[in-house]
Amino acid sequence: MAPKQKTPKVVQQDPQADAAAAQRTADEQANKAAAARKQQRQKSSLLSSGGERGNDSGGKSTLGA
């Protein structure tokens, strides 16, 4: 006699919960990217570096001479 086949279980999904989870993931990734951009801007700011990075005058200490 053939073995009795079991019917597969039906997976119930909540579309609203799936959408909320996807939104949370997207928000987390966007926040990480924004934080990285903000950190990079702060590192390259003239205010944080005391103007040292922006002073590329080739050794001159005055504008005209």
Image: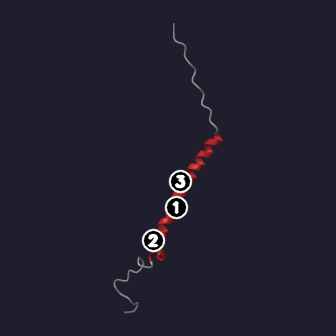
Residue beneath disc 2: 44
Q: What residue type is labelled 1?
A: Ala
Q: Distance between the residues labelled 1 and 2?
A: 14 Å
Q: What residue type is labelled 3?
A: Gln
Q: Is mark 2 on a helix, strand or loop?
A: loop
Residue extending furthest toward the bottom: 65
Residue beneath disc 3: 29
Residue at the location (44% across, 75% down)? Answer: 49
Label 1, residues with CA under 10 Å away: few <14, some 14-19, many ≥20: few
Q: Is residue 42 above or below residue 27?
A: below
Q: In this view, does 26 lie above or below 9?
A: below
Q: In this view, does 43 lie above or below 50?
A: above
Residue at the location (47% across, 66% down)? Answer: 40
Q: Where is residue 7 in the image (x, y as percent from the top left)?
A: 58, 20
Q: What element carries label 3?
A: helix
The label number, if any, that marks residue 35 in the structure image: 1
The label number, if any, that marks residue 62 in the structure image: none
Q: Name which of mark 1 and mark 3 comes first in the sequence.
A: 3
Locate the C terminus and report the quarter of the image it occupies. bottom left
Label 3, residues with CA under 10 Å away: few <14, some 14-19, many ≥20: few
Q: Distance between the residues labelled 2 and 3?
A: 23 Å
Q: Position of residue 16 (x, y in %)?
A: 65, 42
Q: In which quarter of the image is residue 12?
A: top right
Residue extending furthest toward the top: 1
Task: Count up the numbered dots.
Answer: 3
Residue at the location (49% across, 76% down)? Answer: 47
Judging depth in this view, the residue of 56 and 39 nearest the camera is 39
